[in-house]
Every structure is written in C-alpha cells, then in structure tokens.
Amino acid sequence: MASRSITFVLPSDFRTIERMVDEAEQFFSALVADEETAYNLVLLTSEAVTNGVEHGNAFEEDKKVTITFECDEQAATISVTDEGSGFAPDGVADPMSSDRMMADRGRGLFLMEQIADEVRFEEHGRRVVLVVKLA
C-alpha cells in the first residue's frame, strides 16, 4: 500500500467532532484490514478531536482544529492540532487514582495511551500525535 494522507482544518464545534468520526471511519476502514484496529483508530480520533475542540479551543468556532490522518504499511497516524494555549500532559490527574475512579470525565488521555503505540505531545500540548503500528 502506498502512503495515504488527508488533512482537515475545521471550526471548533460539535459538528467537527461528529464529522471527524465519520471521516476516520471511512479513511481507516478502507486502508486497515483489521476491524478492531480500524475501530481503535476511530476511537482515538474521537478522543483527540474532542480534546482539541473542547479543552484546547474551548468551543471557540473562530479557532480552528487541524486533523491529519496518515496510513502506510507500517503505521496509521492521527495528528490533531488546536489553537489553544496548550497544556502539560503530566499535569493531568490520573484517572485511575482512587479519588478519580468514579469521575465521569478525564479518561481521554489515559485511553489514548492505552490504545496507541505512541503518543506524542508537541507545540506545548497544542498538538497530539497518535501512532498505531500495523506491521
């Protein structure tokens, strides 16, 4: 398979989250043979885009979120960049701590780290890059 990629630049609203879930499903299901892996890539997209739209850009529609999907024989990569002020990943509360176990939010980063083979935060936390190995 030749390397394929697609990039979207969209406003920070709920429609963007819904659209990117659909786009991820179309893109990755066409290129990734394993259904569970394709599903995980859609889930990673949902979490990363939601974080960029909600936490990074605070749903400010004039702020854009840039999403790139890449796929080749070796790996699938999702990159999400927001225009927010960034964050320090080590400052996020551990969702597995006893005082956070019953919280209904705050598991997105944990989930990304459990599913992706590689999670990188760049641009002071304004960009997350998620890599899932395919080979």
Image (spheres, rainbow, N blue to C red):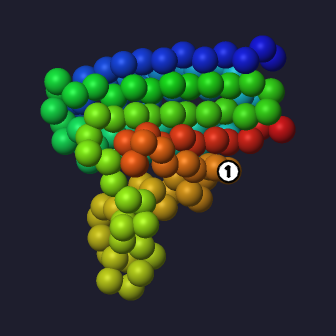
> Residue 129 location in percent, x, y?
54, 40
Q: Does residue 43 appear in the picture of this structure?
A: no
Give left or right: position of 63 versus 131. left
> Residue 90 location in percent, x, y?
43, 66
Give left or right: position of 34 versus 99. right
The residue at 52%/52% (across/down) is: 112
Which residue is farthest right? 135
Question: Circle 1: is it few (<14), some (14-19), or many (20+) Cα within 10 Å?
Answer: few
> Residue 14 location in percent, x, y?
24, 31
Task: Identify the image quadrant of residue 76.
Answer: top right
Q: Is residue 129 above or below residue 91?
A: above
- SS class, disc 1: loop
Q: Nearer the viewer, residue 94 or 125?
A: 125
Residue tagged 1: 117
The residue at 39%/85% (across/down) is: 98
> Residue 31 location in percent, x, y?
70, 21
